[in-house]
Image: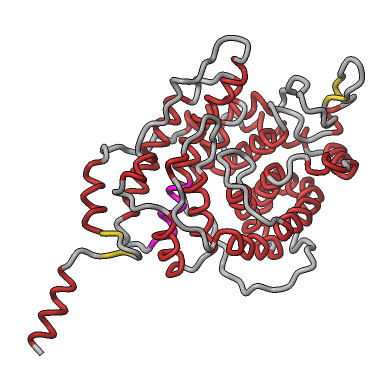
């Protein structure tokens, strides 16, 4: 008996092991090497700044894009703005359609956080003027008219932002948000149905560091599906995340970041799987997917993202500014993903504090550089900052694991 007790005490005294060989003692030692930082201040002034940035682009039609999609610019000779675009389109601002949707979402989220925000009247004007029946009818008509390759306009990333926006306003108790919810509902229903079909038809995920990343759009859509209680969409995201990512191992962090990355491909996938897997399965999956936090392979997430190589002068200055803005935004996106991973771990998991510390470091760097890229960054970086702040203020909504079931692809409880 004494031998047995001694053996048990020895096991208890040994360094805790997590999953496939993650050593708790090494995790704690590594945490001590990270700089002591505090979360960036998120006060009324910061919320006003982020709101002002989103407002500045939401009503600002961009120049005619190179890709002739006829959404806003009608390609006669010369190209002309759509007549009465402010009455026949809802998301006509910013540099592109998905950024306009994301900026509206950021404004709705900021108003929900701070109903007395000083820019509340400007946010109300956007909510009122962009979401009249004619605006959303015009959006639906445009999307229904697209044929062939044009039918993929803004799918899946823009669709995911509409679903997130719809969930944000539908899940609100505000009468003003309720009006936006009612207006956006037909477009959200239309996109939910097609996004479900898209997921089931997808043979392989996109693992890039830009907007087409499959796990990234699924994460945004999952936020919306949970808040809008769209059960068909939740089931589709849950089942297809498992189908596409469950067998993934050894994510190559050495590929991050590339020159135009705004998404961490490894962290984003890990964050999504933490929301769709049960905790025990997730711990095993995570330890096989990401390198240990104290390993050399993980230190890319502790290092500052280098933007010094970006040339912001010359003929391609605008392209380079866009690249720089992406790398700045990557700071916020990494921070959001790190917090989401931490939320999925057991409360006593020592990696939680590492992920939180790294998230604060990344977000601080993002705020320090948020104004460096001019309008190329201004039109969307505030949206990524709000995503981070929401993750810091509270856990992302979880999708309860559901048994796979047959579906005809139709939308759920919209």
Q: Residue at x 23, y 52 (%)?
A: 28
- The picture quadrant where one finds residue 32 is top left
| Quarter of the rendering occupied by the N terminus | bottom left
Q: Residue at x 82, y 28 (%)?
A: 68
Question: Compared with residue 198, is residue 278 higher up or lower down, i.e. above or below?
Answer: below
Residue 117 lies left or right of residue 18; in this view the side is right
Judging depth in this view, the residue of 191 and 156 nearest the camera is 156
- The picture quadrant where one finds residue 318 is top right
Question: Compared with residue 158, is residue 55 higher up or lower down, i.e. above or below?
Answer: above
Whether residue 338 is visible, yes or no, is yes
Whether residue 48 is visible, yes or no, is no
Q: Residue at x 26, y 59 (%)?
A: 23
Residue 91 lies left or right of residue 373; in this view the side is right
Decide whether residue 276 is among the magenta residues.
no
User: Which span is picked out in magenta?
Assistant: 337-345
Decide whether residue 340 is among the magenta residues.
yes
Question: Compared with residue 139, is residue 22 higher up or lower down, i.e. above or below?
Answer: below
Judging depth in this view, the residue of 172 and 36 nearest the camera is 36
Residue farthest bottom in this picture? 1
């Amino acid at each position: 008996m004494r031998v047995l007790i001694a053996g048990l005490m020895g096991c208890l005294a040994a360094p805790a092991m997590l999953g496939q060989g993650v050593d708790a003692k090494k995790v704690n030692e590594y945490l001590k090497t990270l700089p002591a930082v505090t979360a960036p201040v998120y006060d009324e002034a910061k919320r006003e700044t982020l709101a002002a940035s989103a407002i500045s682009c939401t009503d600002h039609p961009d120049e005619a894009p190179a890709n002739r999609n006829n959404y806003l610019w009608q390609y006669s000779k010369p190209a002309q703005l759509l007549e009465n675009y402010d009455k026949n389109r809802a998301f006509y601002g910013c540099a592109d359609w998905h950024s306009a949707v994301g900026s509206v979402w950021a404004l709705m989220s900021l108003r929900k956080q701070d109903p007395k925000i000083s820019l509340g009247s400007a946010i109300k004007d956007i909510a009122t003027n962009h979401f009249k029946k004619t605006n959303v009818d015009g959006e639906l008509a445009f999307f229904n008219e697209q044929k062939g390759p044009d039918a993929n306009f803004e799918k899946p990333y823009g669709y995911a932002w509409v679903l997130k926006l719809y969930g944000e306003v539908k899940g609100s108790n505000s009468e003003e948000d309720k009006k936006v919810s009612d207006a956006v509902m037909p477009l959200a229903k239309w996109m939910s149905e097609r996004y479900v079909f898209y997921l089931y038809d997808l043979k392989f995920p996109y693992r890039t560091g830009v907007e087409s990343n499959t796990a990234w759009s699924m994460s945004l859509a999952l936020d919306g599906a949970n808040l809008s209680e769209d059960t068909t969409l939740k089931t589709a995201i849950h089942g297809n995340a498992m189908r596409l990512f469950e067998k993934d191992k050894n994510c190559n962090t050495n590929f991050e970041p590339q020159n135009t990355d705004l998404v961490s491909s490894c962290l984003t996938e890990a964050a999504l799987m933490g929301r769709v897997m049960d905790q025990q399965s997730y711990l095993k999956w995570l330890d096989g997917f990401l390198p240990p936090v104290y390993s050399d392979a993980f230190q890319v997430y502790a290092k500052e993202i280098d933007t010094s190589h970006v040339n912001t002068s010359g003929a391609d200055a605008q392209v380079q500014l866009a690249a720089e803005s992406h790398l700045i935004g990557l700071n916020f996106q990494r921070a959001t993903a790190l917090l989401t991973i931490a939320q999925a771990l057991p409360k006593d998991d020592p990696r939680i504090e590492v992920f939180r510390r790294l998230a604060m470091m990344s977000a601080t760097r993002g705020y320090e550089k948020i104004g460096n890229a001019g309008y190329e960054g201004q039109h969307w970086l505030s949206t990524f900052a709000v995503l981070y702040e929401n993750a810091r203020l509270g856990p992302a909504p979880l999708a309860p694991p559901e048994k796979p079931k047959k579906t005809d692809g139709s939308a759920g409880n919209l």
